[in-house]
Image: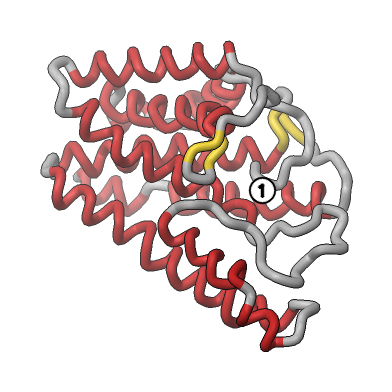
């Protein structure tokens, strides 16, 4: 029965809608216009938060089915790194040479071309030589990559929490604590950067992953319904502060 339910869930459809919202939302800052939003969340930001709730729910379910750290980390790594490596290869070695304003020899001799592959190590880098310097939102090649180190950090934290005594209560406490922290620290606070990631922005996403995990541990599958979804759409954006605006990184 559980297998049947998994085949009939709507997570793929929700992800597709969220992905479309990210593309739609990013079109606004790229043209110098504030993007529309919901409860002070720019539409692309809201879509990213949807991704993190789904990720927290599904990744926690994966851990509960097979709570062995090595296999868990292998699955999580295979989900992130092969696709990310291919994306970086295509971006730096195919798209970059097609659109750079530099001569190809200059493009490939520039250290920034090869530094772009630091993205594979989850160290976000957005600059490629000769690309997008004159855009309204300049020098931004796939700004959405900033969320990947945040998500992978959540992957690493989850087994530590789930291995603790009283894991279900620990998840709830962490979700509440992260939400309080995100409310206390404004998303416009001065950047605190670690490994290419603004920790202030990361704090705006982390609660959503853990609320997804809380939902998976505390509530049965049949509690996933339209009424709960509508309630979550109303309540979750209120749990953290967000800026109404047009940062591409969101």
**Quick check: 247 above or below 132?**
above
- The residue located at (51%, 69%) in the rendering is 87
Q: How many labels does the image show?
A: 1
- The local crowd at label 1, few if under 14, some if 14 to 19, many if 20 or more residues have their Cα within 10 Å, is some
Q: Could you tell me residue 221's position as x and y percent?
A: 30, 32
Name the image quarter holding the N terminus: top left
| Secondary structure category for the residue under label 1 | helix
The one of 207 and 187 positioned closer to us in this rendering: 187
Q: Could you tell me residue 81's position as x and y percent?
A: 37, 61
- The residue located at (69%, 30%) in the rendering is 41
Describe residue 80's horizontal placement relative to residue 43 as left or right.
left
Q: Can you identify the residue that label 1 sits on? A: 21
Describe residue 102's horizontal placement relative to residue 85 as left or right.
right
The one of 94 and 130 positioned closer to us in this rendering: 130
- The residue located at (41%, 57%) in the rendering is 121
Q: Which colour scheme is used?
A: secondary structure
Describe residue 192's horizontal placement relative to residue 187 as left or right.
left
Q: Could you tell me residue 53's position as x and y percent?
A: 45, 35
- The residue located at (43%, 68%) in the rendering is 85
Describe residue 222's horizontal placement relative to residue 25 as left or right.
left
Q: Could you tell me residue 73's position as x and y percent?
A: 23, 49
Name the image quarter holding the C terminus: top right
The one of 142 and 223 positioned closer to us in this rendering: 142
**Quick check: 154 above or below 114?**
above
């Amino acid at each position: 029965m559980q297998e049947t339910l998994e085949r009939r869930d709507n997570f793929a459809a929700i992800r597709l809608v969220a992905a479309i919202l990210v593309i739609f939302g990013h079109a606004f800052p790229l043209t110098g216009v504030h993007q529309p939003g919901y409860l002070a969340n720019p539409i692309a930001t809201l879509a990213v938060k949807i991704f993190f709730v789904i990720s927290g729910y599904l990744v926690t379910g994966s851990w509960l089915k097979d709570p062995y750290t090595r296999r868990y980390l292998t699955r999580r790594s295979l989900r992130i790194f092969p696709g990310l490596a291919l994306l970086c290869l295509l971006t730096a070695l195919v798209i970059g040479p097609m659109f750079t304003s530099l001569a190809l020899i200059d493009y490939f001799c520039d250290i920034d071309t090869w530094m772009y592959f630091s993205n594979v190590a989850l160290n976000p880098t957005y600059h490629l030589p000769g690309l997008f310097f004159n855009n309204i939102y300049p020098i931004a090649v796939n700004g959405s990559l900033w969320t990947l180190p945040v998500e992978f950090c959540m992957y690493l934290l989850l087994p530590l929490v789930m291995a603790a005594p009283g894991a279900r209560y620990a998840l709830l406490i962490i979700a509440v604590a992260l939400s309080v922290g995100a409310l206390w620290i404004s998303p416009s606070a001065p950047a605190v950067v670690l490994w290419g990631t603004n920790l202030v922005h990361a704090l705006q996403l982390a609660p959503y992953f853990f609320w997804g995990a809380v939902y998976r541990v505390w509530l049965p599958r049949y509690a996933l319904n339209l009424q709960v979804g509508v309630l979550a759409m109303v309540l979750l954006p209120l749990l953290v502060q967000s800026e109404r605006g047009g940062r591409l990184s969101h």
